[in-house]
Image (tube, helix red, strand yellow):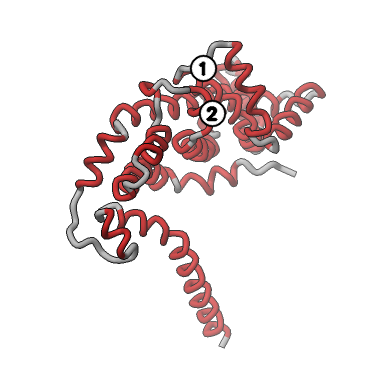
């Protein structure tokens, strides 16, 4: 009797989850479906199938978005932002976790407070600092800005993960004559791989899809435009071309979807390893 009730509950939960999944995927399905339609077909029936399947919209979006160049700019910013956070963020989180004096506890508290401050609240001071250090108008400068904006989350996750690493491993390495940098990169960092993958996935979605920072940092220099900035140009200059715009959205989403599918298995393990010991 109990087994039958458990099966019934499992079936009900399955149906509920499928309905929730359908609600989440429905907008993406509509975008993908309409990216193959003409503008007239979209206006007539947004949920109907296209009369003729083709890639004309994608070819036009490729040209309007200047896709190869914009893709490269977006990739540079994403890789640079992630590289700095992986190197400096993990080292900072490790140092704060292993040297728990008053100063480091205060610094860790500041990182936690920074997580609660939205970028819009400190946008003007950040722009003044970037102007002072001549970081504006540069893909490299924008990547460096992401180091500061993403440091609090990376330090928080790394701090919790380091607390779960036994001290004995590091003590054995020190006895064998391992220096601090070598100790971190050869002993500690490999153990942080799940949490590194976790925050890298999170930050990749942020950097790839960010619009506000590129708009503020890159200005009107079209040679530095990311995919999101060129997508904005499409809506402003070609606001009636929804067929091409939807194709452009799909082209922007494809790289992040592929990346997420390839790396998603590490997310749960990373968040678990980042939990803080009581």
Which quarter of the image is occupied by the C terminus? top right
The image quadrant of residue 97 is top right
**For the residue carrying disc 2, how many other residues have a C-alpha within 10 Å: few (<14), some (14-19), or many (20+)?**
many
Residue 8 in the image, given as x and y percentages of width and height: 52, 81
**For the residue carrying disc 1, how many other residues have a C-alpha within 10 Å: few (<14), some (14-19), or many (20+)?**
many
The residue drawn where x is 59% and y is 22% is: 173
Disc 1 element: loop
In the drawing, does residue 278 fall left or right of residue 44? right
Residue 193 in the image, given as x and y percentages of width and height: 50, 35
Q: Could you tell me how far apart the alpha carbons at marks 1 and 2 are, in whole angstroms?
A: 32 Å
In the drawing, does residue 267 fall left or right of residue 226? right
Residue 136 tag number: 1
Which is more N-terminal, label 2 or label 1? 1
In the drawing, does residue 144 fall left or right of residue 257? right
Furthest residue toward top: 133
The residue drawn where x is 60% and y is 21% is: 127
């Amino acid at each position: 009797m109990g087994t039958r009730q458990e099966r019934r509950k499992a079936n009900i939960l399955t149906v509920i989850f499928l309905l929730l999944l359908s609600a989440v995927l429905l907008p993406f399905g509509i975008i993908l479906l309409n990216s193959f339609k003409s503008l007239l077909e979209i206006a007539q029936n947004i949920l109907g199938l296209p009369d003729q399947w083709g890639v004309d919209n994608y070819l036009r979006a490729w040209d309007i978005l200047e896709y190869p160049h914009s893709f490269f700019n977006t990739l540079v910013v994403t890789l640079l932002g992630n590289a700095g956070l992986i190197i400096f963020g993990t080292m900072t989180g490790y140092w704060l976790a292993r040297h728990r004096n008053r100063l480091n506890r205060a610094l860790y508290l500041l990182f936690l407070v920074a997580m609660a401050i939205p970028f819009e609240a400190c946008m003007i001071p950040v722009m003044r600092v970037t102007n002072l250090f001549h970081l504006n108008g540069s893909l490299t400068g924008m990547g460096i800005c992401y180091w500061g904006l993403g440091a609090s989350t990376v330090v928080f996750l790394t701090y919790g993960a380091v607390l779960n690493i036994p001290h004995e491993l590091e003590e054995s390495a020190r006895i064998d004559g391992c220096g601090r940098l070598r100790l971190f990169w050869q002993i500690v960092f490999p153990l942080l791989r799940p949490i590194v993958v976790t925050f890298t996935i999170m930050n990749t979605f942020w950097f790839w899809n960010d619009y506000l920072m590129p708009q503020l940092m890159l200005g009107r220099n079209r040679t530095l435009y990311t995919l999101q900035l060129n997508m904005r140009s499409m809506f402003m200059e070609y606001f009636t071309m929804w067929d091409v715009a939807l194709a452009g959205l799909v082209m922007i989403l494809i790289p992040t979807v592929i990346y997420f599918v390839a790396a998603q298995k590490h997310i749960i393990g990373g968040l678990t390893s980042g939990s803080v010991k009581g």
